[in-house]
Amino acid sequence: MSGCALFLVGAGAAGGYAASRDSVKNQFDLPKDFVFQQGLAVAKKMGQVTLEDPSRGEIRAYVNGARVTITVKPLTRSAVELKVKARKSLMPAVDTAQQVYNQIATGL
């Protein structure tokens, strides 16, 4: 994460999510496909989707003028890591990442 320190904030599946300067992530005991579909629905609702790749677990979109990347990475058969990264004009946009993450997590 480019040498950025992580810190735990908010509530989430593991008692809080990790946030860096441009991303938010957490682990969920849910199937990859379910989390991916929720992320895709939120991305479509909040912005314009430019890429959806279920096999790689990656969604790219523009939300509030920021480039957002949503990644759903399997950890086990029944657990995934959800990461939402946002950058605006090459600068971190963690506020946008948190907004997108919160909308996804609310639906899980």
Image (cartoon, helix red, strand yellow):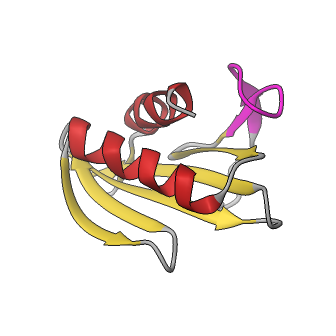
Residue 89 appears in view: no
Give me the residue at 69% from left, 55% from top.
81
Query: In the image, is residue 52 above or below residue 96?
Result: below
- Tell which residue pokes out farthest to the top in this image: 10
Front position in the image: 91 or 48: 48
Q: Which residues are magenta?
A: 7-18
Q: Is residue 11 left or right of residue 54?
A: right
Q: Quadrant of residue 61?
A: bottom left
Residue 29 appears in view: yes
Give me the residue at 43% from left, 53% from top.
37
Query: In the image, is residue 42 above or below residue 36?
Result: above
Q: Position of residue 75 (x, y in %)?
A: 79, 65
Q: Position of residue 56 (x, y in %)?
A: 51, 78
Q: Position of residue 2 (x, y in %)?
A: 64, 62
Q: Position of residue 62 (x, y in %)?
A: 22, 51
Membership of 11 in magenta stretch:
yes
